[in-house]
Image (cartoon, rainbow, N blue to C red):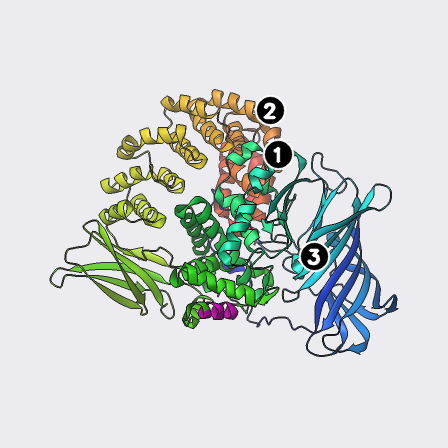
Amino acid sequence: MRNSFLLALWLGCAATAAAQQPTATMYRATERKVNALVHTRLDVRFDYAKRYLYGKAWLTLKPHGTATDSLRLDAKGMDIKTVELVQGNTTKPLKYDYNQRQLLIRLGRTVPANQPYTVYIEYTARPDELGARGSAAIRDAKGLYFINPDSAVSGKPVQIWTQGESEASSVWFPTIDRPNQKTTSEISLTVPSKYVTLSNGQLTAQVPAGPGLRTDTWKMDQPHAPYLVMLAVGDFKIYKDSWRGKEVNYYLEPRYAAQAKTIFGETPRILEFFSERLGVAFPWNKYSQIVCRDYVSGAMENTTAALFGEQAQGSARELLDWEYAGVEREIAHELFHHWFGDYVTCESWSTLTMNESFANFSEVLWAEHAHGPDAGAAQADRSLRAYLRNPANYTKPLTRFQYADKEDMFDAVTYQKGGSILNMLRAELGEDVFFRGLQRYLTQNAFGTGEPHQLRLALEEASGRDLNWFFDQWYYGAGHPIVTIDYQWDAARKRQAVVVHQTQAGAPFVLPLKVDVYANGRARRYAATLRQAVDTLYFPAATRPDLVNVDAEKVLVWQKQDHKSLAEYAYQYRHAPRYLDRREALAAARAQPTDPVARQLLVAGLGDKSAVLRQLAVESIDLKNAALRKAATSLLVRLAANDSSVPVQAAALTALGTVQEKRYASLFNKALDSKSYRVQAAALQGLLPLKPAQALARATAFEADNKGALTGALVAVYGQAGSPAQWPLMLAKYDAADPSGRFEMLGGLASMLGRLEDPAALVQGITRIRDLTVQFKAFINSERIIGLLRQIQQQQAARPTAAEAAKLVARAVAEIQAAK
């Protein structure tokens, strides 16, 4: 599972959000196996009008360990019609109790351990009537989703798809909905013959099923967990690819089919790379990827049939704005799950790290391989920062046997911290040993389950090293080191001292690391291990080193205050080889922009080989600083006009827009002819204060074709320079946007609302701002939006609608403040 729904917006994130979640101290044991799933056969058809699934299930199980006379299945919100024991060609009715959550079946006899038996269940699934609760990562839990089933929304496709993780497969078929169960499967779907279907495994049959209907049968001969069972139905175009003779297919809506190869075409290369690197060939018989509407998370690793939200399809122009951190990263993430999650599944939700941390780590692996070391390091840095952003993460162990709800496990500890820990462990053990250990873990637990102890043992076997110390502090403990680093050169003793204080609460961490000491333009590397609250490391140094680079491999999971001088950071930028060396130097310069050395560093960053760092340098330069403006503007103009990276171009245009100088109007006008929506958006925003009428004319011309950032810019222009006639369009754009897009439009909406003299429009706008803020209050800085509402009230003060505006704002502010 990959959650791409991030409200990292202009509002900023609320660091206390996770702290508001309930806590629990109850031990969450791995579910006991009384019965073990063996095979699941389903025959399903759909009632689009009622949003029902009519199902027949044949479940083959066997008692696990000891004999049993009963079977308990998860079956959420169903109508149970028939429960029978299959006896050859006949069936025997069975007694059962059902509480709308679980189905307890009395088998009528005691079945010996490991003896298979089959029960038949006829049922109706009613997912829309369930009232299931989702989580921050997976926003809904009703398992089966009917998208626009009555075609009420013009232009929106009719689709059906499923989402099983964590325990929502049991909304649409009876099962034992736990990750420590594995089953083979066979699913027959009767659907309108105009639609395409997808499920796990191979399509083995397609037969007519009456007027306008067809039955497709999909068979999965290898066992997988119930939450990985899926189906999808709709009007999709299939692009057929292959890898080592296996089917590799991409399912998209017809209007995006031309981009299928561009979006998903790297999949065979990723399959090859992961297979070779892990020493275990992709273990499944096919791999399909499908893009569906209104998906409740980012993407999902259903076995052989990964499902992506609609962010994974776009027009040729939209694809120009895509970055690695978006869809390509998700493709790698879901594919790596087919080893870590599908082939070997976490034993329980407490050990979800065995799925998600590895998938998060794979994002770094693929970036390194496909785009180079800087790209891999940039992705690793993004990931670690996502964990560090919220202090509430610091109290949670990676392997978590106490939690309030299993959905709480889908967080930045399980994903980003866990992936960062694996990256650190790779550096500690070395590439070859680390991946030999992963190969051993996968082969020893193939088609079964795994937990951190098994990973530790596999890595110990591969390395010959004891790793209890590492797993104890990183997998079963919480938090991370918080350090300060100071430097002292002793001329008399000709040695360099490095003093590291660990200031976090609790015991010090054991931290093996590498230290590079630079003198006369050359570096000498030393290995060291920190163990105490205060460690002093000594290194030979005949002269004062030019630089001492602690954690030279830049892999430690920690927060540090590194007391280097700006001169040392400038040396680090020029001489240390890694992406994070340069990023640290630019960050230090950003904190002291008036220092001449900092200015030189930031200007140097504009030419960095990494597009991510060029963008950081652009965004770090304050053009209100006369010296920086003089040194940087010619370079910024060059980046804005010609940089190979769309984000860098857009950032440079945005930076130049802050100076509001008319000499850049021609640059902005030229950039408006770009094919990139993102570049056009930055140019339009830059042009707005210089030539409002011209910006308004260009915005109007974009009404027929605008997406993403350009839509937000269009709304901003209309907000500041448009007329009330544009309000309906602004409202329509807002309503059509996703939550992130809506937040980006708030400034434009507020500007227009401050000028409108239409009570109905004021109600429309202020109500939307209120509702959005209340919905996402836990994740945003709501005070900033309250400030925006009060700005509307101030702008309305001299207008005929002042009293109405004041009343609406007061009510909206009160409801926002009262919201939890």
As drawn, is 518 to the left or to the right of 331? left
The x, y position of residue 806, in whole percent, is 55, 38
**Pointer 3 or 2: first along the chain:** 3
Q: Does 556 lie within the magenta span?
A: no
The x, y position of residue 386, in whole percent, is 46, 52
As drawn, is 463 to the left or to the right of 47? left
**Rendering quarter of residue 37:** bottom right
Residue plotted at (59% across, 72% down): 29
Residue, disc 1: 258
Disc 3 residue type? Answer: Met
The x, y position of residue 35, in whole percent, is 71, 72
**Pointer 3 or 1: first along the chain:** 3
Q: State the count of labels.
A: 3
Residue, disc 2: 725
The x, y position of residue 773, in whole percent, is 55, 45
Q: Nearer the viewer, mark 3 or mark 1?
A: 3
Residue plotted at (32% across, 28% down): 634
The residues tagged by marks 3 and 1 sit, at their Cα atoms, a distance apart of 30 Å
Q: Is residue 165 visible?
A: yes
Q: In this view, does 146 lie above or below 113?
A: above
Residue that lies at the very extreme toward the front in this rendered image: 245
Label 3 crowd bin: few (<14), some (14–19), many (20+), radius 10 Å: many
**Which range of residues does the magenta coloring cover?**
452-461
Q: Nearer the viewer, residue 745 or 195?
A: 195
**Quarter of the figure that contains the N terminus:** bottom right
Disc 2 residue type? Answer: Ala
**Pointer 2 or 1: first along the chain:** 1
Q: Nearer the viewer, mark 2 or mark 1?
A: 1
The residues tagged by marks 2 and 1 sit, at their Cα atoms, a distance apart of 36 Å
Disc 1 residue type? Answer: Ala
